[in-house]
Image (cartoon, coloured by chain):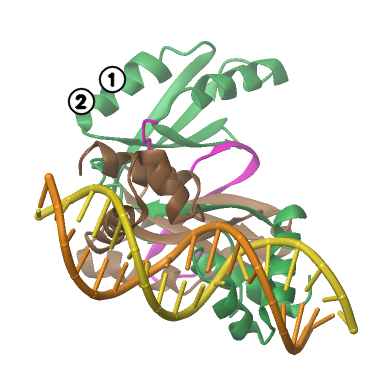
Chain colours: A green, B brown, C yellow, D orange
Amino acid sequence: MDPIDRKLVGLLQANGRITNVELAQRVGLTAPPCLRRVRALEERGFITGYHAALDPQAMGYSITAFAMVSLRSQAEGDLAAFERHVAGIPEVRECHMLNGEIDFLLKLVATDLAQFQSILTASLITAPNVTSVKTSLTIRTSKNEPGVPVEE
Amino acid sequence: MDPIDRKLVGLLQANGRITNVELAQRVGLTAPPCLRRVRALEERGFITGYHAALDPQAMGYSITAFAMVSLRSQAEGDLAAFERHVAGIPEVRECHMLNGEIDFLLKLVATDLAQFQSILTASLITAPNVTSVKTSLTIRTSKNEPGVPVEE
DNA sequence: GTTGAAACCTCAGATCC
DNA sequence: GGATCTGAGGTTTCAAC
């Protein structure tokens, strides 16, 4: 991971469809070594994939919300069981286990309030081992940068 | 937004570097109309960009955390001022305004606990108009899907 | 108005230095 | 890391449905 690699991941994080030749120009290499570096960054696990970013509103998802979930038992098996449960709910986009009073923070999307409520009541509040689910709706999102900071 | 367009955005969300010819095959078109549809989806705002997904750990960011921030004044100008403030902090990756007691939920990353603490004390707790900042560290992330659900 | 066929041109990927 | 080459893919043009 030298300065050129850092530039490469930064450029690819900002624009995942940049062509290899433009990428090479930007970092001051010719195309073949540039491509070799990118492949190496993928294989070594620095780059885990490439994704189109979709506008949730345009895609019909007017609701973005967060759910703070507490469980009765924090035994590893029960934590993992909850994680498997939410893995099967497509509207739950992220599931983070936290320290402190809240066990899990979920980010979820829904097409409207009715669907949001039905996910909540049918899939979250009634899930095994759940004692508390506090939700907050997103009023607006002012910053939504993918990944991590990369200078340049 | 017909069934072919929905397939296209789904495929591009899952694999942002898929070639246009493979994309065309998957949706049952030839390359030219497929490319036109993708360009249209970009121009109409359904697709907002393409990004390489980076592994935060591999990139040296061992800490992912959430901060729940409450402000003294919720006047629009004060809310916007806070949003502008966090927009300038590269380690803050997301800023969502929520309903309820918490005004803002921030997702942030840091290289280590020392850097996390310094961001907290130097940039968040001391920011204008902030009354309370509660943070939770992420123990592990079991699900981290970009975007929205797309069937297929 | 959208698709498909053909042409062109650029790029990706392999080989060798 | 760089130079060269070949085949594949991206992009435009235009005819047809």
Label 1 near label 2: C-beta < 8 Å?
A: yes
Which quarter of the figure has residue B10? top left
**Picture disc at residue A118:** 1
What amino acid is at disc 2?
Answer: Ala
Q: Horizontally, is A99 left or right of A124 in the view? A: right
- Does B129 appear in magenta? yes
Residue nearest the viewer, comparing A14 with B62: A14
What is the x, y in percent for residue A84? 58, 21
What amino acid is at disc 1?
Answer: Ser
Residue nearest the viewer, comparing D15 with A70: D15
Q: Which chain is mark 2 on? A: A
What is the x, y in percent for residue B16? 48, 53
Q: Is residue A50 above or below residue A86?
A: below
**Picture disc at residue A114:** 2
What is the x, y in percent for residue B34? 32, 52
Residue B105 visible in image: no
